[in-house]
Image (spheres, rainbow, N blue to C red):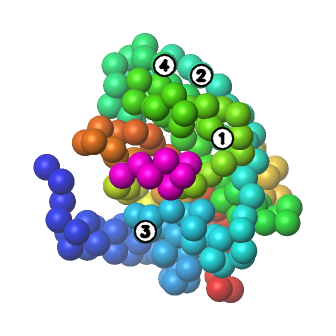
Amino acid sequence: MQMSKNEANRDLIEKIKQAEEEYGETFSNTQKILLTTDGSITAILDVLYGKITLTTLDQHFETADKSHAKLVNVSEGEQINYREVIMHKDGRPLIYAISHIPLSRCDENICADLVRADIPIGRILKNYNIESRREINNIFIEKPNETLKELFKTDEDMLARDYVIINNDEILMWIKEVFPISYFKEI
């Protein structure tokens, strides 16, 4: 059963408070907006920095194992598109994201855009007028893996969130977005 908007907002506020308590620091308003928005992160970054760019680091089709199948609510063995990207402005990395998209729920044109171009998912959804909603699963702090250390040139803790984009009451995609905890404090 879907939560009401008020319940969802209270849940997000609680998730932010828990992450702040865990870290021992209050996050900036911009960090809170980026972690809790149920809209496009790309649109927010475009407003803050001017039009951002996206670079695809890895993209391939894979067979969903048990954990990935659970993320997007498909059967094990179904084909999913794995995508790993970095959103940046003038060479400065802003947000790292990975996504899993079940091919069975992906329109042919959308799949083609995902594969052939460095287009943020938010822009793809907008370009095709896809009616969807985002449901945030988790907001958390994590230690960076080697990829994140190399991309952001830091080993500081990372703020992260994962969520699903739902279309026609089915999970269209699962996304995780990550950025260093020192980012977006000045805005």
Q: Amino acid at mark 3?
A: Thr
SS at circle 2: strand
Q: Earlier in the sequence, mark 1 or mark 3?
A: 3
Expressed as whole percent of the image width and height from the top left, the position of residue 144 reads 67, 52
Residue 103: numbered disc: none
Residue on which the image places disc 2: 61
**Which residue is rendered at x = 66% and y = 53% of the image?**
96
Residue on which the image places disc 4: 79
Q: Earlier in the sequence, mark 1 or mark 4?
A: 4
Q: Between residue 86 and residue 169, name the one nearer to us.
A: 169
Q: How many marks?
A: 4
Expressed as whole percent of the image width and height from the top left, the position of residue 153 reads 83, 58
Vertical placement of residue 14 versus 160, above or below: below
Question: Rounded to the nearest whole Å, what is the CA distance between mark 2 and mark 4?
Answer: 7 Å
Q: Is residue 23 left or right of residue 114?
A: left
* CB contact under 8 Å: marks 3 and 2: no
Magenta part of the chain: 124-131
Asked whether the viewer can see residue 101, the reply is yes
Question: Rounded to the nearest whole Å, what is the CA distance between mark 2 and mark 1?
Answer: 12 Å
Question: Rounded to the nearest whole Å, what is the CA distance between mark 3 and mark 2?
Answer: 29 Å
**Dividing the picture into quarters, in which one does residue 185 lie?**
bottom right
Question: Rounded to the nearest whole Å, what is the CA distance between mark 4 and mark 3?
Answer: 29 Å
Expressed as whole percent of the image width and height from the top left, the position of residue 51 reads 71, 68
Q: Amino acid at mark 4?
A: Gln
Q: Earlier in the sequence, mark 4 or mark 3?
A: 3
Of the 4 image quadrants, the one containing the C terminus is bottom right
